[in-house]
């Protein structure tokens, strides 16, 4: 396994390197050191458990952005069948940073959509690092309306650093595109289930993040501004990102405490990228369960419950 | 300093400086756009629009609503809501301290003021952002007051107007502030479904989460001339794309050109033009019948303002319209 280890995983990386070396020796020299390898593997697992039991918010932010973290399409191919990736906003362009289309979840037709990041440099650029332009939100809006028309529940997957701060994006009404999606989602007549699978970056995330259920993967993050952005505004230095991550409480635990999400999906040991299949299986279960719960509501109840749920998302004194 | 001033003996120069300072503060103020020195009382009469260059200066929320609504019959909504530091957020300063400081500075509890009142005798709900309060940032109280405003408009079936001036979401309330975008948009979706008009007036500046929610969702999107409006701030964009931004980028006129706005309206015409629009949408008699504001004022507010200034003392145009027709009660 060729894993990209993060800084705080270095002790694990060293152990794993040792194990790999021994395994290599095993095959080349034909000596039997299976026991020793087994011990080391157990040690590596224990070490991973211990490191992952007390991650800081900033470390979790790095996991959420891990280069090998499963992206939307990785889950789509594992969870759904018959997925057809639809393109274009019908007004200006196609935006590959946000993908979506109809698919089947255990045979049932649904609409899926999510931010899509790229794996290698070329794809990263093609996907604009998962930062949609206005066309991405407008394509999403088109798919939302389509889903309502054909009575398909919507499943969204959130994984973006945020909206793209570019000249063209502003010219073509980035603000309006995001606002419009919130407006449409708020009264959509089909169930909407949102899952933060990686980075939930501000308005770009929320544009497909208003729904009847919101889930977060254990090591995903969700925040109003990136830790770097927050740090450079409030601390006047992006180097204080770790402090900003701590202060804003961007992790699934903290956000659950605030009552802003419904479910935290536990990740495989070491993070979702260590076992994408297991993660996808957990996600599939949660989606199917949530969907069957929402099926019990009629359209009016559904929309009313969504509004009431949103209205609980505030904290102040008086009235 | 000119060569002549350099020749003037030092002591005399100091005296001149002192004399200048002895003028009572606040009588004169300077236009930050054309540098004209303006008589403060005149500026106030002109609704803080520079009589020389029509630059629209920033004004406070309460002043804004006083200017906009009829003199009598206003009642504040949601005044009892107070912000809370539920995260115990601390950067270089504690959020609690920032709140106390902002409250002292502005006399407001938070950055949005909502009034139920009358616009040329038409019952309306009007909200305005206070930019001096933590850059008009939107947290729980701002979001909740806005929702209360929209719900009141829905209950009473009366139009709603919101004047935005905000840097965006309030970071010190973290994700809860992001959720205010969802809440305010959801409240507006309800208004829309019920066929109740909502007019959004974007003033300088309107950016971030506020622009990407309640500001851009007007049935009519209006901006004051020259306002900075956009999602990402110009500095962030410049750092990202590493080019110099085009002239007038993210200003009202730029947004109008790109189709994001319905109108740019001079502050001195705001009352009459919004009232006329709302009267049409709610099938009431025109509060200012006959007076056509089409033509140059529709497309070029600067020209409109200078026309107005040339024709009559600046700032009286709006008042004249009202004076002529204030006695007409709208049909209901």
Image: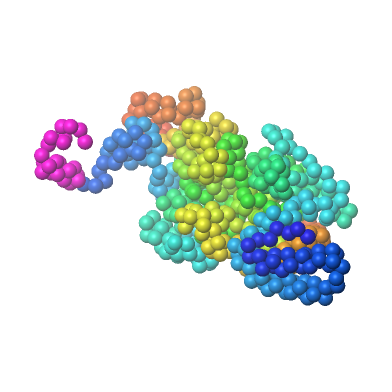
In what quadrant of the picture does the C terminus of chain B appear?
top right
- From which residue to which does the magenta span run? B1-23
Percent across and percent down for residue A9 are 66, 65
Q: Residue at x 64, y 59 (%)?
A: A62
In depth, the one of B297 and B167 nearer the eye is B167
Location of residue A101 by image quarter: top right
From what the image shows, is residue B123 above or below residue B293? Answer: below
Q: How many marks?
A: 0
Whether residue B118 sits left or right of residue B40 in the image: it is: right
Is B21 a magenta residue?
Answer: yes
Q: Is residue B189 shown left or right of residue B18?
A: right
Q: Position of residue A294 (x, y in %)?
A: 78, 59
Q: Is residue B152 left or right of residue A12?
A: left
**Residue at left offset 29%, top offset 41%:** B29
Residue shown at the point (84%, 63%) measured from the top left = A28
Residue nearest the observer in this picture, B285 or A148: A148
Q: Position of residue B125 (x, y in %)?
A: 51, 48
Q: Is residue B187 visible?
A: no
Taking the spot 50% from the left edge, 27% from the top edge, the residue there is: B299
Main secondary structure of the magenta stretch: helix
Residue A272, above or below B161:
below
Q: Is A304 placed left or right of A280 in the picture?
A: left
- Asked whether residue A140 is drawn in magenta, I would say no
């Amino acid at each position: 396994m060729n894993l990209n280890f993060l800084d705080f995983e270095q002790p694990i990386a060293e152990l794993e390197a040792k194990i790999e070396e021994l395994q290599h020796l095993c095959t080349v020299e034909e000596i039997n050191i299976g026991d020793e390898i087994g011990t080391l593997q157990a040690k590596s697992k224990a070490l991973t458990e211990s490191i992952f039991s007390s991650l800081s918010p900033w470390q979790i932010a790095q996991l959420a952005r891990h280069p090998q973290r499963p992206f939307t399409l990785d889950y789509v191919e594992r969870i759904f069948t018959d997925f057809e990736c639809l393109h274009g906003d019908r007004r200006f362009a196609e935006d590959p940073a946000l993908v979506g289309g109809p698919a089947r979840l255990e045979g049932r037709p649904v609409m899926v959509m999510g931010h899509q990041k790229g794996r290698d440099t070329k794809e990263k650029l093609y996907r604009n690092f998962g930062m949609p332009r206005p066309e991405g939100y407008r394509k999403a809006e088109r798919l939302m309306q389509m889903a309502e028309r054909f009575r398909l529940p919507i499943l969204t997957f959130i994984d973006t650093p945020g909206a793209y701060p570019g000249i063209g994006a502003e010219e073509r009404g980035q603000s309006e595109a995001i606002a419009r999606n919130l407006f449409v989602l708020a009264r959509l007549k089909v169930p909407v289930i949102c899952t933060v699978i990686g980075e939930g970056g501000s308005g770009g995330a929320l544009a497909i993040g208003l729904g009847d259920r919101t889930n977060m993967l254990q090591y995903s993050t969700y925040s109003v501004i990136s830790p770097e952005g927050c740090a450079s505004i409030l601390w006047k230095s992006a180097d204080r990102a770790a402090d900003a991550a701590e202060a804003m409480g961007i992790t699934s635990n903290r956000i659950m405490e605030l009552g802003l999400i419904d479910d935290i999906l536990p990740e495989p040991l070491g993070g979702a990228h260590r076992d994408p299949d297991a993660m996808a299986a957990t996600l599939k279960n949660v989606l199917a369960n949530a969907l069957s719960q929402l099926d019990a509501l009629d359209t009016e109840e559904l929309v009313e419950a969504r509004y009431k749920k949103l209205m609980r998302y505030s904290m102040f004194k008086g009235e | 300093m000119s060569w002549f001033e350099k020749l003037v003996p030092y002591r005399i120069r100091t005296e001149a400086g002192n004399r200048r300072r002895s003028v009572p503060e606040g009588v004169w103020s300077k236009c930050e756009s054309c540098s004209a020195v303006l008589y403060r009382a005149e500026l106030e009469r002109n609704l803080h629009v520079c009589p020389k260059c029509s630059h629209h200066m920033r004004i406070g929320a309460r002043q804004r609503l006083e200017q906009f609504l009829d003199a009598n019959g206003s009642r504040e909504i949601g005044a009892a809501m107070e912000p809370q530091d539920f995260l115990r957020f601390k950067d270089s300063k504690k959020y609690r301290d920032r709140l106390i400081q902002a409250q002292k500075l502005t006399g407001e509890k938070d950055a949005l003021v909502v009034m139920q009142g009358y616009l040329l005798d038409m019952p309306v709900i009007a909200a305005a952002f206070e930019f001096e309060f933590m850059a008009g940032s939107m947290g729980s109280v701002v979001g909740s007051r806005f929702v209360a405003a929209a719900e009141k408009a829905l209950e009473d079936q009366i139009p709603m107007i919101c004047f935005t001036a905000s840097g965006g979401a309030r970071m010190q309330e973290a994700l809860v502030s992001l959720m205010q975008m969802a809440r305010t948009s959801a409240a507006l979706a309800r208004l829309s479904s019920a066929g109740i008009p909502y007019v959004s007036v974007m003033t300088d500046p309107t950016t971030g989460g506020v622009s990407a929610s309640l500001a851009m969702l007007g049935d009519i999107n209006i901006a004051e001339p020259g306002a900075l409006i956009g999602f990402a701030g110009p500095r962030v964009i410049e750092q990202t794309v590493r080019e110099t931004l085009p002239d007038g980028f993210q200003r009202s006129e730029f947004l109008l050109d790109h189709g994001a706005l319905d109108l740019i309206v001079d502050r001195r015409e705001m009352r009459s033009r919004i009232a006329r629009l709302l009267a049409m949408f709610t099938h009431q008699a025109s509060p200012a019948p006959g007076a056509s504001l089409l033509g140059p004022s529709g497309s070029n507010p600067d020209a409109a303002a200078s026309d107005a200034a040339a024709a009559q003392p600046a700032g009286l145009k709006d008042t004249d319209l009202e004076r002529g027709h204030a006695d007409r009660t709208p049909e209901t």
